[in-house]
Amino acid sequence: MIAGGRRRRRKIHRFLGWGCAWLAAGLVLCCLADMVGTVLLRGLESFRWRMLWTPTSGSSGGLENALLGTLLLVAISVAIAAPLGILGGVYTAEFAGRRTARVIRFVAEILSGVPSIVIGYFAYLLLVQACGWGFSALAGGISLTVMMLPYILRSTEASLQQVPLTLREAAWGVGMTRFQTIRYVVVKPAMAGMATGVLLAVAIAMGETAPLLYTAGWSTMNPNLQLTHQPVGYLTYIVYKYIEMPFPDAHALAYSAALVLLMVVLLLNVAVRAVVGHASVLRFGRGRSPRSEDYRRAGGETWQIQRKRRRS
């Protein structure tokens, strides 16, 4: 009787738990579908291909200057944030002591929780005014770099920590140094997670408006090679500002900019996954992965010892 009552309670708890999980997932998917559907429907209605090579003019025109400015800002931020974040993640996961790693994680979590408008205002005081750069692409790119760094660092660290210790032990067993082990053995299986972290940071940077209002300004001119004292346009400004204007052309431009942003983020996801998958096929062969049986055999005797321990 007691065992039967426990089974019924477990079934009820399991049913309630899975029901709440499916309900939460359904709510999230419904909200996401509504948002994406609205952007697609309104964006496809208003989008015209000539917008891609027509600069913005007043409350109408095109998106050429904003698209080029967005790409320039993201390129600057990725060029700075990706090396720093990846190297910081490698140091935290492989070299830092327990106390140092804890401090780095704490700082990264604090930095990721800082409101973007605070980062933009700090960059405005430091770069635009104190350094005298004015509204410029470089000031906007550095402000986005500060936002991207914690995501790249933590994703790199998490990806490296998921690599089995047996692979490191096998590399050390054949005489590899610590740097060689990280370069040739540890980084390869973690490459997909590291690329995903960079992609997430890029998507976050492309969707930001507040820090760029204080640092990049706004311009209807196409960007040039002058990185300072020259404001640039960006897509999120059009989405943020033009949707509030009482003109149909401005609303159409805002929805078109939102559609372009959505498509660019989607293409980035597809491209990164394709590149990571192609690199995995070239290294391990089709149908294989870093966790396949052939790859496990690279661990040699260490892997066999671990398997015997698990069986026993």
Image (cartoon, rainbow, N blue to C red):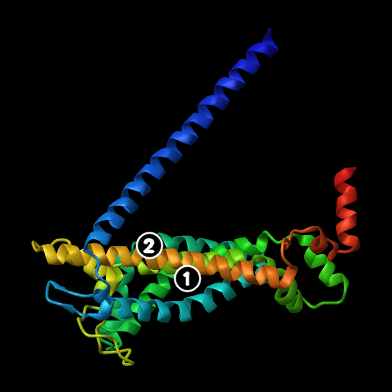
Q: Is residue 111 left or right of residue 134?
A: right
**In this view, 185 is above or below 38:** below
Residue found at x 29% / y 86%: 223
Residue 266 visible, this orientation = yes
In the rendered view of the protein, which quadrant contains the C terminus? Answer: top right
Q: Which residue is identified by label 1? A: 149
Q: Is residue 133 left or right of residue 265?
A: left
Q: Position of residue 275 (x, y in %)?
A: 58, 71
In the rendered view of the protein, which quadrant contains the N terminus? Answer: top right
**Furthest residue in direction top, as rendered:** 1
Kind of residue sitting beneath label 2: Val
Q: Which one is earlier in the sequence, the residue at label 2 or at label 1?
A: 2
Residue found at x 69% / y 13%: 3
**Furthest residue in direction left, as rendered:** 246
When asked about the image quadrant of residue 64, the answer is bottom left
Residue found at x 32% / y 67%: 260
Q: Which of the pair 122/40 is nearer the observer? A: 40
When asked about the image quadrant of residue 94, the answer is bottom right
Q: Position of residue 236 (x, y in %)?
A: 28, 68
Query: SS for tag 1?
Result: helix
Other-residue count near label 1 (Cα within 10 Å), few / some / many at <14 / 14–19 / ≥20: many
**In this view, 141 is above or below 247:** below
Q: Position of residue 90 (x, y in %)?
A: 63, 71
Q: In this view, does 162 lie to the left or right of 194?
A: right
Kind of residue sitting beneath label 1: Leu
Residue found at x 41% / y 81%: 76
Q: Distance of mark 2 from mark 1, alpha carbons?
A: 12 Å
Label disc, if present, on residue 114 of the rendered structure: 2
Other-residue count near label 2 (Cα within 10 Å), few / some / many at <14 / 14–19 / ≥20: few
Label disc, if present, on residue 45 of the rendered structure: none
